[in-house]
Image (spheres, grey):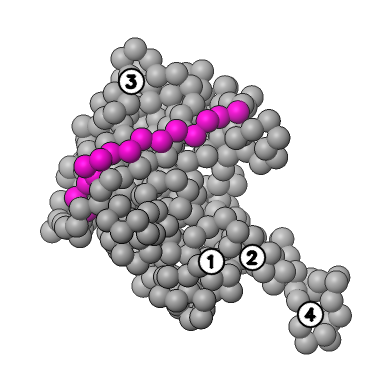
Amino acid sequence: MSVGVVTEQSITFKNGIKLDSGRILAPITLVYEAYGTLNESASNAILVEHAWTGDAHLAGKRSEEDAKPGWWDAIVGPGKLLDTDRYYVICSNVIGSCYGSTGPASLNPKTGKRYNLNFPVITVRDMVRAQKLLLDVLGIRRLLSVMGGSMGGMQALEWATQYPDSIASAIVLACTPHPSPQAIALNAIARWAIFNDPTWRKGEYKQNPKDGLALARGIGHITFLSDESMNAKFGRRFSAKDGQFDFFGQFEVERYLNYNGRNFVDRFDANSFLYLAKSLDLYDVAWGYESMAEAFSQVTAPIQFFAFSSDWLYPPYQTEEMVTCLQEIGKPVEYHLIQSAYGHDAFLLEHETFAPMVRNLLDRVESGESS
């Protein structure tokens, strides 16, 4: 069953937060959606964290005419993995995004104009710091679980290390303790694509720099897939619309990248893309600590990790590094390596591969067995 038509909500925090950079970001508006009912003890809440270019629209539809449901609709709703008859599920759009929460496209109260590149650099930890304000207002002192993949997994790790008393469990999918030089390099090329678009104008554009942003998104899409999934989806098929010896003719994989890049331009802001990419590159679960072990020494809640065999953006060995560290310091941790051909995006596309383990963890935590 679906959660049906949902209404986006927002809260503005006048005093904002102090960022890791030392700057104050105020005021802050956070957009969120919530599904299900919070119980009297406020103990059944699950916070789902979105990835890089995601939003708060996790499940359901925004109107009866809406053709496309939320991005993880398959697991949220009555009788589904995150059963809204049982849990109160929340998804908040991160600061730095362009989907309602405060970001570079927002108006700077000091100037009355868009922040653009006057927006401060933010970290994943800053995103979670803002979310903590939201949960405090909602009256949720302790989450039953926090769950996310990719950048969402990074946020879950921050909850586990920075607010250990505020969660009863964490579920981390397709994540890394810190992006590798290869991952940073790929984001750098995506940035160059935007910087070199003459319409970007150092962030002071009047219209989205379409060519640069479409190219940047195309680069990102390649990292989300895998060799096996691209072979299965496209092979070496040449577009039926083009002649094989037409110089500008395209393979089907080229058409796919072009379509997704151009479609992305219509829904996402280039400066937000840049700021969130910077947040990803800067991420390090051990930032501010002497070591990963010291960072994880803060953990009290069980953490369930999932890695996917064909993920070459954040490959399994990076998850296993965290699992080993937690095991060595005696922290409650569980690890599952999922065999998948879908690459990094497997956590979005193959929920059935991890659902039984997640359901088991939630049952155990709710019953107090893993608290």
Q: Are marks 4 and 3 in contact (CB under 8 Å)?
A: no
Identify which amino acid the numbered label 1 is placed on: Asn
Q: CA distance from mark 4 to mark 2?
A: 18 Å
| The quarter of the displayed image where residue 32 is located | top left
Task: Mark 4: give few (<14), some (14-19) or many (20+) Cα within 10 Å.
Answer: some
Mark 2 — residue? 262
In front of the other: label 3 or label 1? 1
Q: Earlier in the sequence, mark 4 or mark 2?
A: 4
Q: Residue furthest left?
A: 290
Q: Secondary structure at mark 4?
A: loop
Disc 1 on helix, strand or loop? loop
Q: Residues within 10 Å of mark 1 (few under 14, many from 20)?
A: many
**Residue 292 to residue 184: above or below:** above
Instruction: Write down the residue under mark 1.
Output: 208
What residue is pinned by disc 4?
Answer: 249
Task: Give the foreground label among 1 and 4.
Answer: 1
Residue under the point 13% across and 59% down: 290
Q: Amino acid at mark 3?
A: Ser
Disc 2 versus disc 1: nearer the observer = 1
Q: Name the quadrant containing residue 136.
A: top left
Q: Which residue is mark 3?
A: 43
Which element type, helix, strand or loop, lies under badge 2? helix
